[in-house]
Amino acid sequence: MTMANKLNIKVTIEGIQLPLQVSSPEEEKMYRDAASNIQHLVQQFRDAYPQLTNNHYYAMAMLNTAVKAVKASNSTDTQPYIEMMQDLEKEIDTIS
């Protein structure tokens, strides 16, 4: 999608509207889901630690999200490659 074809959306977190441009409905869904997840995390921290300030809740939600991203980038899903190798081995066996 070109800049002219971008979708203008707004997502809201903690009552703050964030204007965004996205390339597709799928990308829009990802942003909306992410905003919902952040809102949920903030509320969880607010419930668990009522004595803290909003900035603490926001920082905790950011840290939690960053830790998940680091974990995801450190783990590689090798299952698709294993399956592909098994399929190739089967094909080779049928040729031999």
Image (tube, helix red, strand yellow):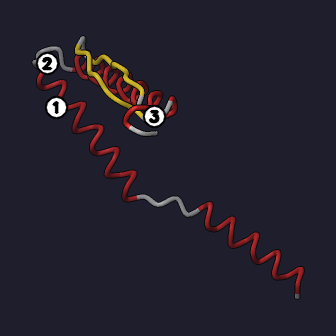
Residue for point 33% across, 19% down? 10
For label 1, count other residues whose C-alpha is less than 10 Å away and answer few (under 14), some (14-19) or many (20+). Answer: few
Residue reaching furthest top?
15
Coordinates of residue 1 in the picture (x, y in percent): 46, 39
Q: Nearer the viewer, residue 7 or 58?
A: 7
For label 2, count other residues whose C-alpha is less than 10 Å away and answer few (under 14), some (14-19) or many (20+). Answer: some
**Residue position marked by numbered label 1 in the rendering:** 59
Q: Could you give the CA–CA distance between mark 1 and mark 2, rounded to whole angstroms?
A: 9 Å
Question: Which amino acid is tagged 2?
Answer: Asn
Question: Which amino acid is tagged 1?
Answer: Ala
The quarter of the picture where residue 82 lies is: bottom right
For marks 3 and 1 on the same chain, the one whose residue lies earlier in the sequence: 3
33 sits left or right of 94 in the view:
left
Q: Nearer the viewer, residue 45 or 89?
A: 89
For marks 1 and 2 on the same chain, the one whose residue lies earlier in the sequence: 2
Q: Could you give the CA–CA distance between mark 3 and mark 2, rounded to whole angstroms?
A: 28 Å
Check contact, mark 3 vs mark 2: CB within 8 A. no
Of the two numbered discs 3 and 2 in the rendering, the one whose residue sits closer to the viewer: 3
The local secondary structure at tag 3 comes to helix
Residue for point 69% across, 65% down? 83
**Residue position marked by numbered label 2 in the rendering:** 54
The local secondary structure at tag 1 comes to helix
Residue for point 76% across, 69% down? 87
Of the two numbered discs 3 and 1 in the rendering, the one whose residue sits closer to the viewer: 3
- Residue 9 higher or lower than 75, as above or below: above
Residue for point 24% across, 20% down? 48
Q: Could you give the CA–CA distance between mark 3 and mark 1, rounded to whole angstroms?
A: 25 Å
42 sits left or right of 40 in the view:
left
For marks 3 and 2 on the same chain, the one whose residue lies earlier in the sequence: 3
**Residue position marked by numbered label 3 in the rendering:** 27
Coordinates of residue 49 in the picture (x, y in percent): 19, 20
